[in-house]
Amino acid sequence: MTFHKGDFLLVDYVAKVKETGEVFDTTLEEVAKKERLYKEGEVYESKLIAVGEGWVLKALDDSLPSLQVNKPETVEISPDKAFGPRDPEKLKMIPLKRLRDKGITPQIGMRIEYEKKSATIRTVGAGRVTLDFNPPLAGKTLVYEVTTKTKLESPEEKLTALVHRRIPLVEAAKFKIKMKSSEVEIQVPDEAFYLEGIQLAKRGIATDIHHFFPDISKVGFVETFKNPKATVKPPKEEKKPKAKRTRKAKRT
């Protein structure tokens, strides 16, 4: 099977730094726990990738058409096709006091925000700290161990996957999706009503659906709030008509 641009794939992977063997990302919960990457509340499951849409590193994206379902493959990505080379100009030494004044106790390897930029603490010396503003994986060769689990075919599967991609904390099956002519209606379960960023997620879902289903002109979200105190009255029993009494004829 050959995959093409726009195909929907569910993919598992383990991503490592080639030079050290360090695992920095994975879709597999057991690997995340083993490598001490596990985060409570994180969803570990096969990742949805639309081929050629830039949802993963371009070099990994470009390799997807040559992969096969359920056949593990290894994809190696050089630094220039990953996060670029390390730039010595992005190393900056600052006084230790500046961080302590911000309530930060610096430790080597710690990621912090400094002057609205992300940085890694590389050294902590006598009153001085070296900050590295390069991306953490800059200058590294990356190795992805990839397995394509399945290719989604039906519109219903694809719509469900697009919803779950934006709202991964709620089970995909709890969203009821109706597709009729040029409209899609998505019934949102109450577990999703108050999720942080839910409005942005819904906007993103609508944008994704319009992109992959250009014939869909309208995407609607239905949220139903039930009254927990309301009681459902049983239906009234219909009264059976009384049988008419017949008078017996008198004997003469």
Image (tube, rainbow, N blue to C red):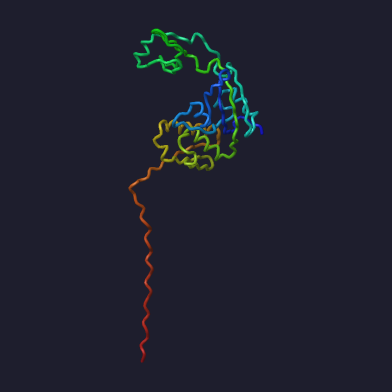
Taking the view exactly as shown, the residue that stands out farthest to the bottom is 252
Say which quarter of the image contains residue 48.
top right
Q: Which residue is located at x 51 percent, y 26 percent?
A: 35
> Residue 236, position in %: x, y?
37, 60
Residue 155 location, quadrant: top right
Relative side of 63 to 40, left or right: right
Query: Vertically, is 241 above or below 234?
Result: below
Q: Quadrant of the C terminus?
A: bottom left
Q: Quadrant of residue 49?
A: top right
Q: Quadrant of the N terminus?
A: top right
Tell me residue 194's x, y (percent).
39, 35
Query: Where's residue 189, x and y in %?
Result: 43, 41
Residue 125 against residue 247 in the figure, above or below: above
Residue sitting at x 60%, y 32%? 148
Front residue of 47/51: it is 47
Give me the residue at 58% from left, 37% from top.
152
Instruction: State left or right for residue 131 relative to residue 250.
Output: right
